[in-house]
Image: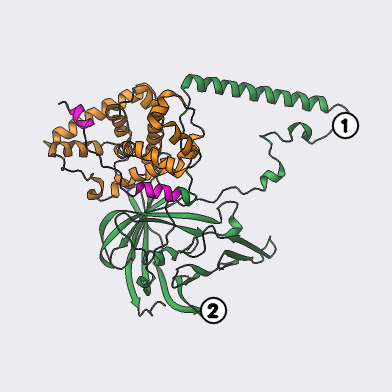
Amino acid sequence: MSAAGASEGSEASIDGARTGDPEALASLYHAHGAALYRLAYRLTGTPQDAEDVVHDVFVGLPEALKRYEERGSFTGWLKRVTARVALMEVRRGKRRREVALEATLPAVDPPPDPSSMALRVAVDSLPDLLRSVLVLKEIEGYSHAEVGELLGISTGASRVRLNRAMRLLRKTLENGR
Amino acid sequence: MSWKDELRRLPAPEPPDELLARILASRAAGVRVVLPMATRRVASSRIVRFAATAAILAGVAWLGWQAVTTRSGVESELPPVWVIGGMPFIPSTAFGQERVRPAMSPRYPLIAQIQPTRVRAGRWTYEGSTTGDGVFTTSQGPPRTIVIAAGNFEGQPIWVASSSPEMADTVLVDRVTLRPLRYVRPMRHARLVQQFSHDSIDELLYLGPRPNARERTLRGAAAFPDLGVGPMLVSWSPHSLELLVQALPLSRAWRGSVYSANWMSMATRVPTFTALDLRVTGTGRVTGPAGTFDCWTLEEREGDYKSVLWVSKDQGWLVMTRHTSSDGSGKWRTEWVNETHLVAVDTLPTPLTP
């Protein structure tokens, strides 16, 4: 276990989760579950899909940890795995467009202001390919090389898609005013 | 604050409280998920690919050399078995006899809570249509009517569910547990009978004589993957799900899985039991010839196959289904959308469920 990994994931929890220990898995969930859920939500666009993604990640984690090479940040590794599962979910279908609007908007307290809501709707209305790049680059802070690796595209393609996403977002927001 | 900062501050919901419990329950139930792992960087993957290609070429060259050198003396048309035996590219005969596909595990806890008294006897008629690329629509043929009637089987109160126009297949379902007891499907040159006991399923498939094939009877048996007490579906029965959804206690966060029994004689292509995963994704109102229904929308998933179901909130009737052929990968040239709509309902007097 590297020092970086140990500090983020607690060496004991990772070792325990690797053997399938429920308490260790619960400990990792408490440490990382909320952040992974937010990442999955931003990529998939619905709470239900985000829930499924996080469910799948933690259900598959004990077996995946056996192949985890313990290099670099454990949180970073976990986020990349979650992003991959979420992107697979996004590629799989368009059914999320059929989900009732009330079910897709996050329940937050206090309720978001109208401009924030407009931005949220504009981001959600982006095509999946563009939204993925926007979320990974601008919200999650990945580099274009990392975005390219996650999406299976070149660094240049990642830049182009981000550019298109920004233009489309600006246009949507301007039209909404 | 720039709008990029605003983007980073966009609110996102917190995970629901019960998610951890669901994860742990899934693990305890034996659910396993293979996660996509990080790939190597391009440079290193190129090296690996180059090394693998070189190794394969060297191996093929060596095999060719061995084949040539061993042919001195006795000429043989057979490949040099002593060389290739046990190599991963040349599987043994026994390897070919292994099952091709493993059974699929459920994604959610198996459905244990049902409301069997909600199931009604009656007739439900559906019409289907197929739309290609949102442009042209064709009918899926004559309407299909599902009949659910009360009956008795070996002294046990049951539901008898069958479908027309063929009325070809019939499934007998325990009225309390909604578990199938017997499934019969007559076909043109064949007949399938599945008998469900408390722990296993027995199958008999009779194949009648054909011009170029002799008469055959195939038998099979398989142990249930579950405890043998909850609901189960019959994959090839078109009306098994319609009966079950009437008894599901659906709510906003509801989800559950149920095993579906396939033909054992097709086990090389389809596992004997597959898991069908259902979850509520939202609500919607559907208006059609049978009326207007406030519905739950359910995602139905069986492996990679996904559909959306609309189930009426008050009666639990399956009002509409939609399956889209495209998976978003772009590999499909035409996107086909199959829909079925409830066009008529005729409920019958229903005896009390014991």
Q: Residue at x 78, y 33 (%)?
A: B82
- Which residue appears farthest toward the right when viewing the image? B73
Asked if residue B158 is positioned above or below residue A134 in the image, the reply reads: below
User: Mark 2: few, some, or many residues within 10 Å (few <14, many ≥20)?
Assistant: few
In which quadrant will I find the C terminus of chain A? top left
Chain of the residue under the numbered disc 2 shown in the image: B
Horizontal and vertical percent for residue B108?
Answer: 42, 52
Does B332 sit left or right of B341 as displayed?
right
Tell me which numbered mark, 1 or 2, is placed earlier along the sequence. Answer: 1
Q: Colour of chain A?
A: orange
In this orientation, which residue lies closer to the viewer: B53 or A40? Answer: A40
The span shown in magenta is B3-26
Horizontal and vertical percent for residue A61?
Answer: 45, 39
Please tell me the numbered disc located at residue B154. Answer: 2
Circle 1 residue: B74
Q: Residue at x 14, y 36 (%)?
A: A115
Residue B17 in the magenta stretch? The answer is yes
Element carrying mark 2:
loop
Q: Residue at x 41, y 73 (%)?
A: B148
| Chain letter matching colour green | B
User: Mark 1: few, some, or many residues within 10 Å (few <14, many ≥20)?
Assistant: few
Quarter location, residue A129: top left
Quarter location, residue B298: bottom left
- Which residue appears farthest toward the front when viewing the image? A12
Mark toward the viewer: 1 or 2: 2
